[in-house]
Amino acid sequence: MKIPTDLLYTQDHEWVKIENNIAYIGITDFAQGELGDIVYVEIETVGEKLMQHDTFGSVEAVKTVSDLFLPLSGEILELNPNIESNPELVNSDPYGEGWMIKLEIENSKEIDTLLAPDSYASLIGLL
């Protein structure tokens, strides 16, 4: 199970890659493994400003539907167009081609509430 060291994580199993004031967000390798085969990603919040921990969409897998929670407050700028037609990218490449949204960060102080890779590894029982 991969936990890239250049990302930050949430207790809800989302990952965050920060580039200046923009965050790329997806679900972790652990999360996609727990969900199973993902068949649909529903995100209808593009263009909206949401607060940290708000639901920004959902993931439908063969065995369950799971809400997606926003790791940071901000405006959702973009949905990854590739996952609309190929939701299985979330399973095969969760940290790359399977990213979900691009967010303009509203409150950079919230970054301090995210988990470092080793803390996330401990959360899921790898440390």
Image: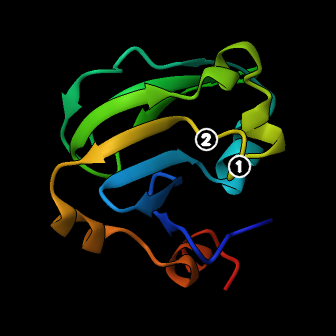
Residue furthest out toward the front:
20
Three-letter code, disc 1: Gly
Q: Secondary structure at mark 1?
A: loop
Q: From mark 2 to mark 1, how far is it between C-alphas? A: 6 Å
Residue 20: image location, x then y, percent? 35, 62
Q: Nearer the viewer, residue 36 or 24?
A: 24
Classify residue 76 as left or right of residue 42: left
Q: How many marks?
A: 2
Classify residue 51 as left or right of residue 56: left
- Identified at 56% across, 77% down, the residue is 117
Q: Residues within 10 Å of mark 2 (few under 14, many from 20)?
A: many
Q: Would you name the residue on which mark 1 appears?
A: 96
Residue 112: image location, x then y, percent? 27, 74
State the mark number for residue 99.
2
Assess whether mark 1 and mark 2 are in contact (beta carbons under 8 angstroms).
Answer: yes
Q: Residues within 10 Å of mark 1 (few under 14, many from 20)?
A: few
> Residue 53's image quarter?
top left
> Residue 36's image quarter?
top right
Q: Secondary structure at mark 2?
A: loop
Residue 86: image location, x then y, percent? 77, 20
